[in-house]
Image: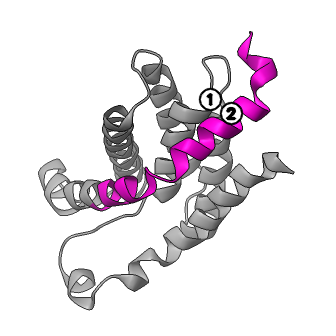
Amino acid sequence: MKRLLLPAILLVFLILEGTATDFLPKEWLLSDYYMIPHWVFVILVYIAIFYDFDSTYYCVFYGIIFGFLFDLLYTDILGVYMFTYGIAAYIIHGVKKLLHANMFVAILMSIVGVALADALIFFLYSSVQGFVMTWKTYALMSLIPTLLANLVFTLVLYPFLPPLLYKWSEEQLASQKAV
């Protein structure tokens, strides 16, 4: 039963992510800036840092599954978020092997991961749908506000999720730790 807690948390935040913009002030929504919540991806970064061992790749697995669900629920092109979340989670998992798990690393990895995922999503959508937005406009109008919004989410989530993930990792993955 405990193995279902992590997917359940991801599912709840997948649903909340779709309604996050409803809670923003109307002035923010009517502006030219776009804040895209990547809450599921921030949780995937936390899973990569605090739950996965070097030999386990649950963050990648959950990234592919919940990226596909995001594509299915919220987008018109299947595979963009699935591919992006899977690749970005794999890169974060690889980089975390070089760093120690602490607050600053988690925040830095979350920001780098969100920037990577969001830029990759922009690149894929602009390739497929032919957006006419320059990189500079995208960076100023979407990437920076997205990073700031997800930084706030990362900071709010940090006191709660990493201790739980570390505890669940020790309980559930203890047999794989020796590998």
Q: Amino acid at mark 1?
A: Asp
Mark on residue 79?
Answer: none
Return the x and y of residue 112 as percentages of the image width and height.
32, 38
Q: Amino acid at mark 2?
A: Ser
Name the residue at the right extreme: 1
**Residue 95 higher or lower than 141, as above or below:** above
Q: Earlier in the sequence, mark 1 or mark 2?
A: 1
Q: Position of residue 118 (x, y in %)?
A: 36, 49
Check if mark 1's residue and mark 2's residue have beta carbons within 8 Å.
Answer: yes
Q: Is residue 174 left or right of residue 124?
A: right
Q: Secondary structure at mark 2?
A: helix
Q: Give yes or no for residue 139 being in the magenta stretch.
A: no
Identify the residue shown where x is 18% and y is 75%. 32
Between 76 and 177, the residue placed more toward the observer is 177
Q: Which residues are magenta?
A: 149-178
Q: Is residue 97 above or below residue 105?
A: above
- The residue at which mark 1 appears reads as 52
Q: Residues within 10 Å of mark 2 (few under 14, many from 20)?
A: some
Judge by depth and name the residue closer to the eye, 158 or 114.
158
Task: Name the residue located 81 percent from the left edge and 20 percent from the top edge.
Answer: 175
Prevailing secondary structure of the magenta residues? helix
